[in-house]
Image: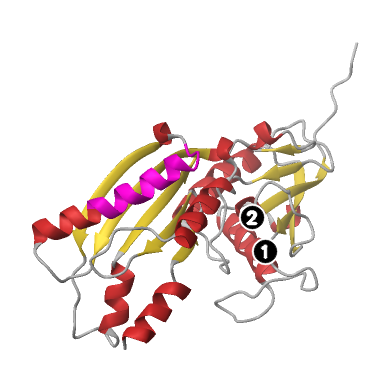
Amino acid sequence: MKRLLSLFLIVFSSVTFAQEDEEVHSIFFEFDKYNLKEEQADAVVNFVSKIDTSRIESVQIFGYCDDRGKDAYNYTLSTNRANTVKNKLIERGIKSKIIITLEGKGRIMLDEDLQTNIPEARSKNRRVDVVVNFKPIVIEDLKIPGVYSSVHKDAIVGDRIYLDKVLFERGSSQLTYQAKKELDKIAIQLQKNKNIHFEIQGHVCCTPTFQKEAIDRDTKKRELSTNRAKRVYNYLIMKRISKTRMTFKGYGNTQSLKKGSALDRRVELLITKNEAPVEKKN
């Protein structure tokens, strides 16, 4: 059992999870220890260092323990683990001023009736989570020619409207609450500019070069970018945008913005026609 547990700790010594506005990197510790192995230190520093620092708003560090031991001891141990990670980050050049939270949260209780592998569950709870929070994206700041964040009456054919809050979780075409709020705003802009026609373009990231499309985890089919575009299409129809103004298409991974993977899990509007009357110049 000890050998299996040691193997688990080596294999899962660090794990990264991503959402739209944050990334979480977890470092797992041995029982009753808060020292950091060199390979773990390298992994967490590399994780932070590879992120575009101009996008980082803050870093939060949270320490945890398994369910054994007294509360006071576990709070101290979890805080020591968090401090160990913080000190290693600062030692490797991460600026201390962006670390806004350092907290030991003590033990994570187990519901033994629901756990099929208690040793494994406990090993996952002996960890520190490094949470990197990102600044809001302003697409104009990226200075990509012809790419804007809103629909305006002077749009020309070929302009792209980057829907900066209509981002997706990995493998998903489901619209989040935040995405729907953003599409509500876009729908109002489209209603004000009824002469504009457009193609809804779905995109994905992180697939091998020989696979241009990704698998939608809901349908289990390789159609993720198309499904993302279709979700937006159907939502805009629900918001009373005419079907005659819209088409949709998935482009897979063929049109990366080259600004990071999170920005490639996206939907854009490509302006295909603007029938607004042209004002005569004197």
Q: Identity of the amino acid at label 2?
A: Ser
Q: Position of residue 33 (x, y in %)?
A: 27, 63
Residue 91 magenta-highlighted: yes
Which numbered disc, 2 or 1, marks the residue that appears first in the sequence? Answer: 1
In the rendered view, would you say 14 is above or below 8?
above
Residue that numbered label 1 is attached to? 206
Q: Residue at x 74, y 65 (%)?
A: 252
Q: Nearer the viewer, residue 151 or 259?
A: 259
Disc 1 packing (10 Å; few <14; some 14–19; many ≥20): some
Magenta span: helix, strand or loop, mainly?
A: helix
> How far, Cα to Cα, is label 2 from label 1?
7 Å
Q: Quick one: quadrant of the C terminus?
A: top right
In the rendered view, would you say 136 is above or below 20?
above
Magenta region: 79-94
Residue 208 magenta-highlighted: no
Q: Position of residue 157 (x, y in %)?
A: 84, 41
Residue that numbered label 2 is attached to? 261
